[in-house]
Amino acid sequence: MNYLNDKLKIGIGTDAFPPTTDGISNVAQNYADQINKHFGTAVVITPKNPNQMDSKYNYEIFRYKSWWIPSKEGYSIGWPFKDELHQAIIDKNFDLLHSHAPLATSYYFRRVTQKKKIPVVLTYHTKYEYDINRRVPTKPARDFAYNFLLNNINAADEVWVTSEGTADSLKKLGYTGDYILMPNGCDLPLLNASENEIAIKKRKYNIPENIPIFLFSGRMIWYKNIQLILDACTKLKKNGKNFKLIMVGFGADENAIKRYIHKSGLKENVIWTGKILDRQEIQDYYAVSDLLLFPSVFDTNGLVVREAAACATPSLLVRDSCAAEGIMDGETGFLCMESAHSIAATLSKIMDNKQLLQTVGKNAQSKIYISWEDAVGRAYNRYQIVIENFNKKNNL
């Protein structure tokens, strides 16, 4: 891919950044990493967090005022209302601001651009209507939340989505404007582990050999359809199938999920790793697994599908979900309906066919994997077009 040569200074806005870990946090880190390594200068703009360890990063992280709410997931709520904060961003002379969520930091950027004209890109990553409808109890409050998000989105000079399904979510919020498809990349390198290397990794993590290994990786939240995975595994076990299910991650519902595992009689089948920040360790779990189970219809892109593909591990996904975009059933992944019965039936057909799983995994690695360098390179090229269009529009 050819990249334009202009050295730009980009403000990467995100409401979540380590020690808060989620998909958007991961995206923000990789944008900052790749821009600073290969293209220009990036500064992360994010709310303060009492557990932050920003000195470990080799680029600038600008933290603004926040409210801290203790929780398992460690989110802080940005509070970007002081005028001196707006001037601090203006003084950094950014060429463009790129927000990765239509929440506090996007509102922050709106306040900044009222004082100085700076082009803004907003990437819409996730289906916020799920959280609003689930967590906001009254209609007036939900309407306020929808309007807040929509106003932040409409204020951007260009809106990006990570999948076509994300655009459907935007429309549910009331967005009627244009958008650009800009897929995310994967920060795990391509890995082709030999059978011997896989056997060594399995011994390292006490994972048995000669039985199918399934994997779920992500936030432990029910709306990712984790119950469907567990119910499907219960069906397999009742039908005499032997397997292990590795659960990698943490989240608000993890205690309830553990109780459900115990109640379902799956305790001996599940390997629970908890929170893992070491990317090499996470890649090891992908490498030893035969299949990623990711039936979420909430996720708009599913970074984990590309992470699995990096290790030649195929994924089982819900047909017509955002995570399944671009996946050919039986060629670059496996598709099922959004039900425990369908997941179990599909697993029963493929779980013991090692050759099929390996072939589909190799196809996924060669056809759906995209590195973060390439993904951010595309975005960087687009930044320059956004800036050019912005300057023409504003006669700058």
Image: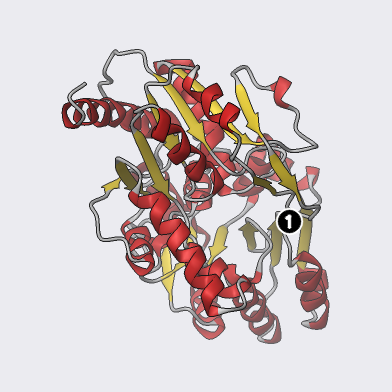
Relative placement, left or right, of 68 versus 350 is right
- Position in image of residue 157 (x %, y %): 30, 40
- x, y percentage for residue 66? 69, 42
What is the count of numbered marks? 1
The residue under label 1 is which amino acid type? Phe
The quarter in which the C terminus is drawn is top left
Name the residue carrying label 1. Answer: 250
**Residue 204, how many percent across, how many down?**
79, 42
Which residue corresponds to the image point at 33% horizontal and 31% vertical from the top-left?
119
Question: Quadrant location of the N terminus?
Answer: top left
Q: Nearer the viewer, residue 146 or 245?
A: 146
Dividing the picture into quadrants, the one containing residue 234 is bottom right
| In the rendered image, the vertical position of residue 189 relative to residue 338, given as above or below | above
Please indicate, yes or no, whether residue 352 appears anywhere in the rendered image. Answer: no
Circle 1 SS class: loop
Q: Is 93 situated left or right of 81 in this image?
A: left
Q: Quadrant of residue 209?
A: bottom right
**Front-lying residue, 171 or 394:** 394
Q: How is the image coloured?
A: secondary structure
Q: Quadrant of residue 367?
A: top left
Of 180 and 248, nearer the camera is 180
**Within 10 Å of the Cα at label 1, are there few (<14), some (14-19), or many (20+) other Cα atoms?**
many
Of the pair 165 and 207, the residue shown nearer to us:
165
Residue drawn at (31%, 58%) of the image: 164
**In the depicted structure, whether residue 41 falls above or below residue 216:** above
Q: Is residue 151 above or below residue 276?
A: below
Image x and y of residue 83, in percent: 57, 31
Q: Is residue 27 visible?
A: yes
Which residue: 51% across, 39% down? 108
